[in-house]
Image: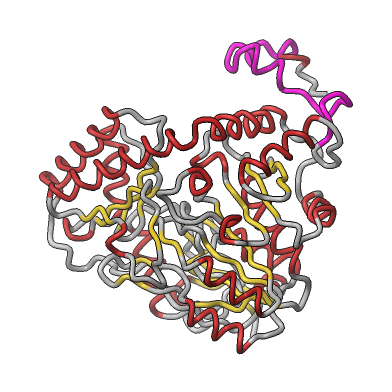
Amino acid sequence: MPGHKGGRMNPELPEYYGRLCMSLDVNSMKPLDNLGHPVGVIRDAQALAAEAFGADHAFFMVNGTTSAVQTMIWTTCGRGEKIIMPRNVHRSAINALVINGAIPVYVNPGRNARLGIPLGMGVEDVQRAIEQHPDAKAILVNNPTYYGVCSDLETIVSIAHAAGMKVLADEAHGTHFYFSDRLPVSGMAAGCDMAAVSLHKTGGSLTQSSILLSRNTVNPDYVRQMITLTQSTSANYLLLSSLDLARRHLHFHGREVYEKTIAFAEYAREEINRLGGYYAFGPEICNGDTCFAFDLTKLSVHTRDIGQAGIEVYDLLRDDYGIQIEFGDVGNILAIISAGDRRMDVERLISALAEIKRLHRKDPVGLFDHEYIDPDVAMTPEAAFVAQKETVPLRASLGRVAGEFVMSYPPGIPILAPGERVTPDILEHIEFTKAKGCFMTGPLDMALNNLQVVVS
């Protein structure tokens, strides 16, 4: 295997992907090592990655950072055991709880009222959660959030370790923290026990490739066993080799790569703010706690003041100007900038935003003004997901306990998760985002006219 035999089975494959790509699409033959039990070249490549990222161990992941986040949780928490986490986590973290039965202790993140976005966890809130749940096994921290916001990670690590708890960093958007002293502290530098790093997002590897980092405070052989529960036994060597190539490039050139990225983002923020109407926010939103630090490479732009939801600006950029950005939500857009961009690309984005403001500006009255809603947790995610459920019209779900997820993707942070009660604010949010054209995922009814709720 693979049966295409270098592309000869289907000539359209090498014609489309190229012969070199097809010749490198191989399986786990002995000289190439085996990702599930690495003893050769993969083991050596992972050791180099651990060194580059300041970890004791590194594990290559080909099922995305989703599998890395889930492995962290499964390694540190079992059925009925507690894990402290912010509610604005990626769905992969809550999915991990659905599968293994661990119990979430949610910490509501801070909020920025002007932007309507969730921030990070406050240190006092984390300390309170630790005191109220001293039996919790671990704390999961976003480092950073999708918007570039970081909690006070080093302080959280200190108080968690003092309480005997492991700290897990979801660094799906934090690869670059490891290669610049102008960016927030990385998970490994802050003393976290494990970190899930999505190298493909900002590190230059192929989509779906990721690494899981750990310290010796966690048994690496046990981590490897947890990984094999969900990782493919037919690891794609194009993905694996891209991780090794990206690691090598960042090891030798990471500092200059991210200096260029920061320069692009800072220039774009300054120019967009000159336009008026928009607010390209940056480190000035830091408050020393729930927004302890800000990722300077992030270009997050508040759009509500021009009377447009973020998803509407996202659609206009793509449909009318041929510019694809990362995502738009109810009040903001996010553009991922990297050293792979060109000055011309940044200038086109700025010019397009200016034109959108001129052509589409209107009164913002009626726009939804917040992205995060405090959950009303009635059941654990696992209990709700496996419970007997019934399907009801969306509006009829008010007051019921959800048995499934509802979220916009990206970013994949649930508006509603299994076990949470449906409130008027949640319904309003779902209906607004659906009406504005957000890509809604999670529910059994893909049109989201109905919702599965737990039978009471």
**Horizontal side of residue 215 vs 396, given as left or right:** right
Q: Quadrant of residue 282?
A: bottom left
Residue 105 seen anywhere in this rendered image of the structure: yes
Residue 139: horizontal and vertical position, in percent? 62, 71
Which residue corresponds to the image point at 41% horizontal and 36% vertical from the top-left? Answer: 338
Magenta range is: 7-34
The residue most toward the bottom is 132
| Residue 216, placed above or below residue 288 | above
Q: How many marks?
A: 0
Q: Quadrant of residue 91?
A: bottom right
Judging depth in this view, the residue of 357 and 54 nearest the camera is: 54
Please state, as top left, top right, bottom left or bottom right, where the C terminus lies in the image.
bottom right
Q: Quadrant of residue 365?
A: bottom left
Residue 388: horizontal and vertical position, in percent? 70, 76
**Horizontal side of residue 217 vs 37, given as left or right:** left
Which residue corresponds to the image point at 57% horizontal and 83% vertical from the top-left? Answer: 129
| Residue 355, placed above or below residue 385 | above
